[in-house]
Image: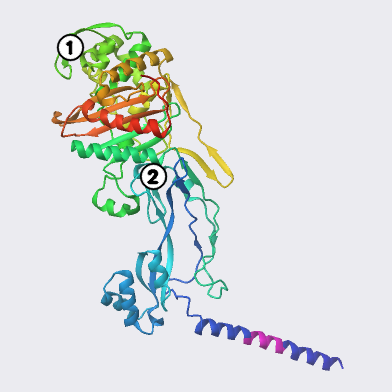
Amino acid sequence: MFAESLRRRLWLLSAVLLGLAFIIIARLFCLQVFSSDIPPDSNKPPEAEESCPRRGLIIDRNGYLLALNAFDYEISASPNLISDPGEVAERLSHLLGKPKERILAYLLQDRSYVLLETHASEEVGEEAGSIDGIYAKPRPKRAYPEGDLAAYVLGFVDTNNKGYGGVEGYYDELLKGESEVVEDRNPSSFLPKGMPIGLHLLGDPTLVLTIDRNIQYIAMRELARALAEQEADSGTIIVMEPKTGAVLAMVSLPTYDPNRFAYFAGRFPRIFVNPAIGEQHEPGSVFKVITFAAALDSGVITPDTNFYDKGVIEMGGCVFVNWDRRGRGLVTMRDVLAYSLNVGAVDISIKLGPNRFYAYLKRFGFGRLTGIDLEGEVTGRVKFPWDEDWYESDLGANSFGQGIAVTPLQMINAVAAVANRGVLMKPYVVDKIIHGELIEETEPSPVGEVISPKAAEDLTGMMVEAVDRISAFAGVPGYRIAGKTGTAQIPIPGGYDPEFTIASFVGFAPAYDPKFIVLVKIDRPRKSPWGVTVAAPVFKRIAEQLFLLLEIPPDGE
């Protein structure tokens, strides 16, 4: 009885095992024969791979998308699964824009996998993927809806999801987010064909910039107009909030389209250097603002201090003259700034002495990074009395912006300290970082008080008077504007370029409660060399539009 029961149990167990074996064999047979919708990979077996999370979005201060995520498609084929290579080659030739014979040569290879295209559009990918034996694999890419509008602020992302330049480079690790390691899709997956799986995003931040898309557009349009009118080589415009250090616009031309970075990389290797922060130049007379700030703050002069201008002055073995080689006799310091007299600036530097003069330059941030959150900033170049290549004559030359190298951002940020009652701010371009429900806001960061509020107010008044004297070029009726022109020589081996200059203007408004500050820099203008006729009118056109856009009421006659 016991033996019979044991025998029946053994038979039942054997039947169960045989049934399971049959199911396994049948399943394997189905996978091998019928699951032809999964392309075999002849190069490697299925293995674990890391999925790329979506890169964080970048938007302007008003919510306009500046950088987002899109897809290219990788098109491949399994030749051994294609029944009519000629017909497929014909269809792919029209889709991919490649010769039919070339595609057919790939499809006739005795291989289980061939790569046909690495960067096809979404439309092409979807249609190609509907052909038997052809597979379309989506690959993430970065897209910039505004094209070249904010290229130098944004930077670009390469095919390996690596950011370069601008905020893409500076915030690269943050924008990348995080990802999990997941297994390749199993051929027996029950998910619909084409549905992505295994993408577990642990990070997808959004950067909200201080950049205003509308102001950026205004600056770019006016810069392009100025370069065309003046037949100039290049130029830069920066717009900032002097009270916070927030950058509202940063434009340089020529520029590039970050959507097509590979095209520009192969033809213009230095095009990715942001001229606003990555290139330095001698600023010329706009730098006199800093010389006067130091002199007023230290008590060496007042706005009404008299000075006898002979039109020439000697210092350290060098002879300095005014820009027009004229002397104006007895003038005040207001006149020295308004007429941009080099001789008066040199005299001020002598009164300050090298120790005080260069101490103020360091306070204003020259010769070091501003710390802006953009990749690629350089320090500029200031020679100090303790440097081996410094000479006594450098003190005089530096007083009117010669023999010193600055970036446009350093220059506007220093003048912004005057607009901000003597307080230097750290410039920035990211206003907020949104990470899910967490929002991290950038707090304006004072670097320090570089001059007293009284000195800043006195200098602002002198700059207002300077603009009033050239109101046809820089003034806007109804508004008090403080500003300074600059016409800088361009150093070349053995001296200075005898033909070309850098024309510039920096100004802020309304003068005693400034909402914006603008720097205009035009390189090598051919119609006129002077800052007053080249750069000041560009500032005027931008200021007129900003008063309307920002709804700033008039503050003067």
The region drawn magenta spans 14-22
Residue 407 at least partly seen: no
Camera-nearest residue between 139 and 508: 508
Q: Measured from the top left, where is residue 117 in percent x and y?
A: 34, 68
Per the model, the C-alpha gap separating discs 1 and 2 is 47 Å
**Residue hosting label 2:** 154
Question: Quick one: quadrant of the N terminus?
Answer: bottom right
Quadrant assignment, res 357: top left
Q: How many marks?
A: 2
Residue 31 at least partly seen: yes
Question: Quick one: quadrant of the C terminus?
Answer: top left
Q: By what rule are the colours in the image chosen?
A: rainbow
**Residue hosting label 1:** 313
Q: Amino acid at mark 1?
A: Ile
Label 2, residues with CA under 10 Å away: few <14, some 14-19, many ≥20: many
Residue furthest to the left? 498
Residue in the image at 43% along x and 34% along y: 428
Q: Secondary structure at mark 1?
A: strand
The question of residue 58 being in magenta is answered with no
Q: Measured from the top left, where is residue 349 in percent x and y?
A: 27, 13
Give the main secondary structure, helix, strand or loop, of the magenta stretch: helix
